[in-house]
Amino acid sequence: MVIKTWAVAVAVVIAAASLGEKRVGAEVHHVVGEDRGWDPSTDVASWLAGRTFRVGDKLWFAYSASHGAIAELKTEEEYMSCDVSNPIKILTDGLDSILLDGEGIRYFVSSNLESCKKGLRLPVDVISQDAPDAPKIYTSESSALTAAAAGPTPSSSGRISASFVLLVAGFWLSYMLM
């Protein structure tokens, strides 16, 4: 029985070592604006500060249709000018999820021009699963203080390396087989 337990433990350690530090593909669900949702009173820029978005994560938009729809735009120019005349898609359900299925910047804005101009818009920079968290560069003291007050985001704390998971599973198996 002891030989069998050690064989399982050794196999798990070898498997864990061969995986290195690859991340388990755990998706993170980001609720835009958190409790307030996508609303003209929400400070979307503060919500965005310090967040990391990875391929496979999901964005959730909760909003009132009375405030307008949400448009996903193609270019930064459309985003900056709040030009929703040629969107990639329009979200109108009041509760929509968007799978972040590729790397790059995606642009979301309120279809209400006034709300968009007042800041109800969101650029989402999506990085690969394997990319390390990028260091955050703050352009003002207030944005740095806001990010520090917000604390860690679920997108960086919710990831577990595959080797750690296998190592724990191996110890659990060896304990159960004793």
Image: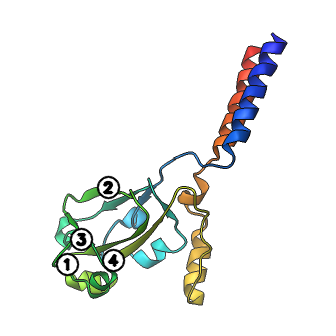
Disc 2, disc 4: CB below 8 Å? no
Please state if 43 lies on the left or on the right of 137 as rendered. left
- Residue 176: image location, x then y, percent: 72, 18
Residue 78's quadrant in the figure? bottom left
For marks 3 and 4, give the CA distance: 9 Å
For marks 2 and 3, give the CA distance: 13 Å
Circle 3 is placed at which residue position? Answer: 71
- 1 or 2: tag closer to the N-terminus: 1
| Mark 2 burial class by Cα count in 10 Å: few <14, some 14-19, many 20+ | some
Disc 3, disc 1: CB below 8 Å? yes
- Residue 115: image location, x then y, percent: 26, 81
Residue 84 shows which numbered tag?
Answer: 1
Q: Residue at x 24, y 71 (%)?
A: 71
- Residue 105: image location, x then y, percent: 40, 71
For marks 2 and 4, give the CA distance: 16 Å
Circle 4 is placed at which residue position? Answer: 121
Q: Amino acid at mark 4?
A: Arg
SS at mark 2 in the image: strand
